[in-house]
Amino acid sequence: MAKVIALFNNKGGVSKTTTCFNLGWMLAERGKRVVMVDGDPQCNLTGMVLDLSQADALDAYYSKHPLGNLKEALEPAFKSRPRPLEPVECVSVEGRDGLFLVPGHVALAEDEVSLGIAQQLSESVQALRNLPGSFRHLIDITAKRYEADFVLIDLSPGLGAINQNLVATADYFLIPTSPDVFSVMAIDSLARIVPQWKSWSQRASQLEALATADYPFPAPTLKFLGVVVQRYRLRNGAPTRGFEKYFQLLGDAIDQHLQPALDEAGALLSPELYREAGLDDGRWLASIPDFNTLIADSQRARKPVFALTQPDVERVGTVWENTLKNITRFRDTFNELAQRVESLTETTA
């Protein structure tokens, strides 16, 4: 069965989507079959895969592929239609065999209220009992159809019912973040929120109404993979002084608040597993400095930073030589990140 990994932080602007896309591509390059799920109504991940340069491109895609997005595929559950959920018609990502996308939908947020009510009242309101388990069921049957080894879920920076559901029912989660004061505050918030969500999912899985639903709500298995810190500048191969300060503050917040809270909630792997994967302190999955102008090249080419070629970046001479060094460095970084994800999840399969 595919391993489902949520990429989540309730702070925005920490490169969740970029991390999801680059990690998914690298896992596929390493021979895994990967389904990426765009769970963010802003649909940024969808925009990195599909050509949305035309004003009506997304609407045209929805019209042509009525079951080809997360929201429409969930409609039988949310609209109580007399047919079961079917696997999403995924998009094959151009240029990377084994990588697929479940496109997002800008109207997914409209289901937030219904799901929130269901997650609170499904025991007493029978019509709502199928909603809480529908997301994970849809992900599982889609992963099975595409024979996926991994499912990566890109989420919005919010604490609503959809994110609660997708995080709580995932097998693993990782936290993209950046070295700044607001990210430190977000780590403290996650130390409170994630254990609450895991506790809620444990109670929900034991409710008879949800256990006997058409789409049973699963018992939680959520485990923390680590933190991916990015969006910082280097000087002489190391973070600049200002960023170095926040690296330390982030580390303190993880050590003193996040990890103890997750440990109490049963959401940590064993220290030995983190060490075997190369995370000696059990926290940093990867450290990724700014992509700078390469991110624009990546978005235009609709491929990850480490897969960019000279024609993609339109640079020559010494400028291309320096760019190639950066591309190679990012390839090494994401290869190591993928290796660690594989190691942490393989051991606990």
Image: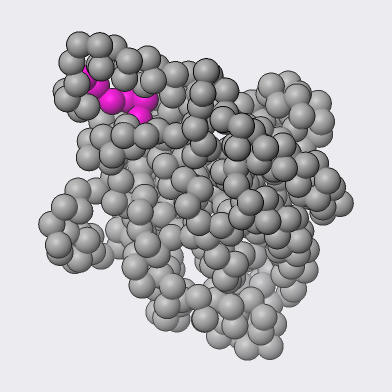
Q: Position of residue 258 (x, y in %)?
A: 77, 49
Give the camera-side residue of 91 and 55: 55
Please tell me which residue is depicted at 67% across the width and 50% down the height of the picture.
184
Residue 97, given in percent of the width and then of the height, sits at 32, 30
Q: Residue at x 50, y 75 (%)?
A: 112
Vertically, is 308 above or below 218? above
Q: Residue at x 57, y 28 (%)?
A: 239
Q: Quadrant of residue 342?
A: top right
Q: Is residue 313 visible?
A: yes
Q: Is residue 118 above or below residue 89?
A: below
Q: Which residues are magenta?
A: 304-310
The colour scheme of the drawn protein is one colour
- Between 192 and 169, the one lying in front of the other is 192
Q: Residue furthest front?
A: 241
Q: Quadrant of the N terminus?
A: top right
Above or below, 190 relative to 116: above
Q: Quadrant of the C terminus?
A: top right
Q: Is residue 86 left or right of residue 249?
A: left
Q: Is residue 262 magenta?
A: no
Query: Quick one: 24 or 14, which is closer to the camera?
Result: 14
Please give the name of the residue rendered at 73% of the width and 75% of the height, measured from the top-left corner.
208
Q: Quadrant of residue 123?
A: bottom right
Is any atom of residue 304 visible in this view? no
Residue 241 horizontal/vertical position (percent): 61, 32
Q: Quadrant of residue 255?
A: top right
